[in-house]
Each structure stands twice: as C-alpha cells, then as structure tokens.
Image: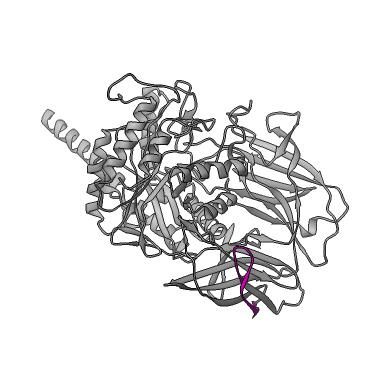
Amino acid sequence: MGIFIIKTFIFLFLALVGFIWWHLFFRATFIPPNESTDLRVKAIHDIPFIVENDLPFPAGVQSTNRQKILLNGIWDFYPANKKNSTQLSVPTCFNTADNPLWDYQGAVWYERKFTLPEWPEDSLLRLTFLGSFYSTEVWLDDNYLGNHEGGYLPFYFDITNFVQPDYTHKIKVRVDNHNNADSLPPHLFRGHNLGWHPYGGLHRDVLIEVCPPTYCFKLDVESDIDSDEGLVHLSVLFHRPGDTLPLQTATLSLLTDNGQIMAKVDSTIYWEDKYGIASNTFNVPDLQFWQPESPHLYRLAIQTEFEYCETTIGFRSIESKNGKLLLNGKPLILKGVCRHQEDRADGLAQKHDSVRNELGTIQNLNGNFVRLVHYPHSSETIDFCDQLGLVAWVEIPLYQAGLGLIRFLFDKTKRDTGKILRGLPGIFWRTNFPENQDLLLKARNELLKMIERDRNHPSVLFWGLGNECWTLNPAGAKALAWLREQASAFDSKRLFTYAAFALPVLGLFYERSFDVSDVVSINEYFGWYYGKAQDAGKYLRTLARKYPHKPLLVTETGSDTVSGEHTSEGPPPRGYSEEYQVWYLGEQWQQMQSVPTFAGLSIWVLKDFLCPEYREDNPVPFYNLKGLLDRDGQPKAALEKVKSLYSNNG
C-alpha cells in the first residue's frame, strides 16, 4: 500500500508539472475578439478609417485653418475623496513627483465654464481631448457626453447640439488613473506596481474645433521611390455630417518644406453617403530622401471652399531583408536610447522645449534612433523626430500582459511567503493573456488609433505591438499575429515589432514572438538582473543563428546607477556606481558587435524616471535609476561613454 501511495504521489506530481509546463509553453488556445462596439472600422474605395463616438477619427491631418477654442488654463479641481476644490492648470498631471498627491490613485474631477463666439452655419463642433489618463467621463451642462478608456491618444465628442454662442456653458470631467486586469497597461495582481508612474489627469490640450459642413479627416499617403524619382499617392477622406450638398472638388498640392509649390491639381470628390474621397498621384523629380543624416521633408496641402489642411511627409523605404535593416535600400545600424515622456516638474505633460532638448541629447550622442516607450508619446514628439532625423519606434501599452508570474516571483517589493503561496495559482493562470478578449480588443483599438494619428510621419519606421508579454507559448504568438493582421490593413509598409524579454535559457527555446515580428527585438539585462555582461554575446548569437534572415535589435539593456556614486580603483564591481554603468554599457556594446545580424541598440533609458515598482529602500526612493541622465536631467558619466561608442560601429 505504501509503495502504491508513493507511486500515486509521484504520478500526480509529474502530471502537475507536465500540466504547468504545457500551460506555460505549449498552450495554443486563442479566440479572436469580437468586433468592438466602441470603435468601428469602415472603408471607402478600399481606404480604411475608424469611427469612434460616431465621429471619424482624424488621421494624418497635421494642421488646419479651422477655428479652435482652447479650453486650457485654470480649472477647478478636486480628488473624489475631497469636498473642497482647488485650482489646477490644464494641461498638467495632478500627481507629479513633488506634488502632495504624487501617489494618489483614484478619481479626480475637473470643472470650468466657457462661452463660445458665433460660428458658421452647418458647422460641426468637436470637443477634443488630446490626452487624459486613464478613464475619462465628460458632462456638458447636464448632458452626459460619454466616456473614454485609454491614457495617451486623442478622443472626441460631437457637441454641436449641446452648445450655443454667447452662453455660459459648464464642462465637468471625471478622470481616474487606476488600472485593472483589462486596462492598457494591465494590472497583473494585487499589490502589483506598474513599470512607470501612472501620471493622471488632463495632460494634453483640451479644445473645441469648429469643423465646416464638409471637412477633411484623413490624409492617406503612399509613396514609392525609384532611384532619384518618387511617386506619392494621396487620398483625402471627407466627412459631411449634415444635409448640405456634397462638395464636388478639392485642390491637392505638393510643396517643398519651405512652401514652394511643386505640383497642383483639382480633384473630384466621390461620395458614399456621408463620406467622400479625392485622390491624385504626384511625380516627384529630383527626389531627396528622408534619412537621419539629411531628414528632407515635403508638404501636402488640401484646399476646399471651406478649409485648408496640411501634413508633412518624407520619402523613405524600410525593409527587413537577409538579416539586415535597409533604409532606402542601404544597411542601417540603429544607435539609440529608450525614452519615457516625463519630467520631474510636469510628468507626462512635459513641455515641448523639454521634449526637443531630450531628443537633441540623443542626437548629440551620435544617436539616430529613439524607442518611445511604452505608450504613444505626444504628436509633437514625433514632429521633432521628423525634423531631427531620429528614427522612431512607437508602441502601445500592451505591457507585460500575462507576465504576472515572473513579476510576482521577482518583484522588487518584499513579500510575505504565505501571501506568495496563496496568490500563485491565480497569477500562474493569468499567463494565458490571449484569452482576455477585453484586453486584446483595447490593444487592437489603441494600435489602430496610434497608426492613424502617426501614419504620415517619416521618422516612424516601427509599429510596436507590445512589450514583455507572456509570448512563450503559441497562444501568445497568435495574439500578436492577430494584432498585426488587424493593423496591416491600415499600414503594411512599416515594420511590425515587439520587444520580448530575455528569459535565460528558456527564452531561446520557447519565445514565439520572433516568428511574428519583422525584427528579432530583445530586452536583455545580462550583467545586471542575471548572469554576466559577457554572457550577452552568446545569447544574442544563438538567437541570430535561429533567425538568420531577420535583423536583431537589442531594445533594452542597462544598469541602475546613482548619480555621484563612485567605486575605488580596479574593475568596478556590480553595483550602483557610475563606473559600473560605464563598464557595463561598453561591455554590452562590444558583445553585440559579434552578432552577425546585429542591427542596433536602444539603451535603457535616457533619464531616471518615477517608477512605483521601486520602493522606499531603493537608493533613490521610487525611481528607476538606469538613466544616462539623472531625474533632473544632469548627465552621468555613461553619457560620454555612449557618445564614444556611437561615434563608430565598434
């Protein structure tokens, strides 16, 4: 009987281990989410567009001459758990690093009054929020306009029937910066702290746009380059919300960056119900490419009897071919840095001059690449990348979905052993994030909106599908493939990417995302979180042998460093010293040179940033310290080291 019990126990134990192994690494169940009711995809003449809150989402329209009424400035403000209001300027974040509410997570209220001037008859008035983190509800006077979930991209409401000129209106906005298991980014388990600070509030402009009876909402640009000539095909999509007669023609123009007209044509608008399209193909003689060393730009303009619209474009091609990245047909090595959009004073509402200065710092490092992590940054950030010649990777906040097991076991917060054991089963089960259809649908919607907003920026070469999710089984790969398929209908000429985490040993065997991505993109921290820096080369070369036809990008590596901390003479021990960061990045760069398909690096990270997963016992409490700059923007010694490394390919 005793032997039978022992054999039974061994059998059950092995069965449990086998089930866990299958669940983690071989589970393949993936059911594509149903069509979203919040965001719908439509098309006219095979050009897709999206509709949200019964309005077409603006896509690629950079500037217009429409009347705009800014609602920025002083608003009444109070947290939901307070009765007395104070005043707060918009745009801003209510929980910046030095604010008494810095660690507040919950609902807050914004209120203000405004009046509108007269506007032309048959206009559509569009209330615009360019960014609000995270979930937002809006009331105008006593009318509930609706809600929006997502922290970084614009959303709109039609308020035409709720306003009148020369009348004092009151707008009320409730914003909640909590995240949960279905949000982007997702909350992984009780007590989980996000990998960056959840800056809350109305962090980008709030305004009312007066759109004419027929207005342009999408500029779809497809360019082809052939030697020193180029073709640009422009499709302009229009919306006619009312019952006015359809507009018949639009004037489409191609201009140099300084405004000289190169070509101009009157194009007929073809209508399908409330949506119209005008198209034309321009030939571009003496074509000048957009590239990091000479980021040449052009402009496309649309003129109708109602309005004038423009967008900036650049001519370039990007390919992943035979283990190399090819920009305009020539090999490209990316020398870059990861960057969060935040600073100590303004958080996510970082001012434009500060943004440009940080991007200029990357350029001054001899850099040509910025990975904009882990969410869509402001549109002005992408404008600066276009102008400076910085290649940009943009991504959605599908961040560490399904990674609760790893994060729970290796979390930086000290945990009670009993709580760990009780919480493991539920966290383990959540590694199968592809079955969370709400999460995936939000990811799809965020991805489409990001592509539409940023579609005409020449600097954007990579659409990021996510970061460090559980993609070690076929189900995770299928979820990424579904996202890619959905997005490819909107743009198939850029590269789709995903930053996988380097799980030592197991990642080499089971990481499935590289089969979906155009580039092998890996976040590795050999020499900091695990192993030795010298181990990075072997790991990366193994990946290169496994995927010889795909270029390899190291999308994160770095070490926490306290500005001003130094070690004594001799090889620097692993630790927080500036000397170790200098040595670490130099050794990592040297290891990468031995990888035959190596195509670039984005160092983690440009600047120390507020990060709640780091706790009170961190050398600088609550900050991720891997920056080349400290939290006040002052350089560490590694900044000059990186400048030296990036001055050549060795």
Q: Quadrant of the C terminus?
A: top left
- Residue 268: in magenta span: yes
Count of numbered marks: 0
Q: Nearer the viewer, residue 494 or 52?
A: 494
- Residue 246: in magenta span: no
Q: Which residues are magenta?
A: 254-271
Indicate whether 586 appears above or below 435. above
Q: Position of residue 525 (x, y in %)?
A: 33, 37
Q: Position of residue 101 (x, y in %)?
A: 63, 28
Q: Is residue 269 left or right of residue 586?
A: right
Q: Nearer the viewer, residue 167 or 644?
A: 644
**Residue 423 lies in what quarter of the image?**
top left
Colour scheme in use: one colour
Q: Nearer the viewer, residue 318 or 521?
A: 318
Q: Is residue 8 left or right of residue 66?
A: left
Q: Is residue 165 visible?
A: yes
Q: Is residue 118 left or right of residue 183?
A: right
Q: Is residue 183 visible?
A: no
Q: Position of residue 177 (x, y in %)?
A: 59, 38
**Residue 99 lies in what quarter of the image?**
top right
Q: Position of residue 480 (x, y in %)?
A: 40, 55
Residue for point 58% across, 77% down: 280
Indicate whether 50 appears above or below 509. below
Magenta part, dominant SS: strand
Residue for point 74% across, 61% down: 66
Q: Quadrant of the N terminus?
A: top left
What is the residue that sits farthest to the top in this orientation?
Answer: 568
